[in-house]
Image (cartoon, grey):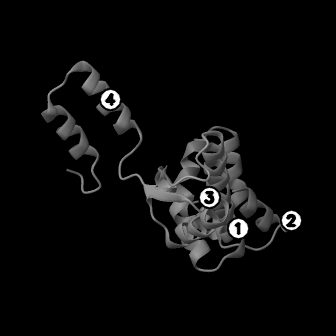
């Protein structure tokens, strides 16, 4: 939203993010949306709805959107590199499990940027994409701790499977 607002008022580079935002939220301008968020008439969390559109606009060649995707890839890579270093695993083959909507969407641009960044910063790491939300692991551990039947764990996994059951 910040980049689109700057583009709209002339302080930033033109970007297709402006049209993405106004069409998605049905506002005449990005400035109007900023006010909706600022005054609590639109929950800030709803801005996450723009993620698929940002990826699409970046794939279409928008430089501003691409810079956001590049930054996302860099942040994920740096975080993983730091974690691997602190655990003494940077020089050891280790799986790095990626989760969350942006990553599990398997966007080709984002994934190619991640692959390239990991090849440089953590070349021994093997990227693994989670198929279910992280809460599923916690729920499975809880069910195991409670001594729940395997059927309960199976139902939980089925509920969160990518195919929906």
Distance of label 2 from label 4 (alpha carbons)? 50 Å
Q: Which mark is residue 11?
A: 2
The residue at which mark 3 appears reads as 122
Kindly report which numbered mark, 1 or 2, lies closer to the viewer in this rendering.
1
Instruction: Classify mark 1: helix, strand or loop.
Output: helix
User: Which mark's residue is nearer the viewer, 3 or 2?
Assistant: 3
Identify which residue is drawn at 61% across, 51% down.
90
> Which of the 4 quarters of the picture holds residue 18?
bottom right
Q: Which is nearer the N-term, disc 3 or disc 4?
A: 3
- State the residue at coordinates (78%, 67%): 7
Residue at the disc numbered 1? 67
Looking at marks 1 and 4 on the same chain, the residue that comes earlier in the sequence is marked by 1
Relative placement, left or right, of 135 versus 153 is right
Is 75 above or below relative to 45? below
Name which of mark 3 and mark 2 comes first in the sequence.
2
User: Quick one: label 1 or label 2, which is nearer the N terminus?
Assistant: 2
Q: CA distance from mark 3 to mark 1?
A: 22 Å
Locate residue 21, reporting x and y percent.
61, 62
């Amino acid at each position: 939203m910040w980049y689109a607002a700057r583009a709209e008022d002339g302080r930033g580079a033109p970007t297709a993010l402006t049209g993405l935002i106004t069409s998605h939220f049905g506002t005449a301008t990005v400035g109007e949306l900023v006010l909706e968020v600022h005054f609590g008439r639109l929950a800030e969390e709803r801005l996450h709805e723009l993620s698929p559109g940002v990826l699409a606009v970046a794939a279409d060649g928008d430089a501003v959107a691409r810079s956001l995707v590049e930054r996302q890839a860099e942040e994920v890579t740096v975080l993983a590199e730091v974690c691997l270093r602190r655990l003494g695993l940077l020089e050891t083959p280790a799986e790095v499990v990626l989760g969350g909507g942006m990553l599990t969407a398997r966007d080709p641009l984002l994934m190619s940027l991640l692959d390239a960044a990991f090849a440089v910063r953590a070349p021994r790491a093997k990227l693994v994409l989670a198929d279910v939300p992280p809460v599923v692991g916690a729920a499975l551990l809880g069910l195991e701790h409670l001594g729940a039947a395997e059927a309960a764990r199976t139902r939980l996994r089925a509920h969160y499977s990518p195919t929906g059951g």
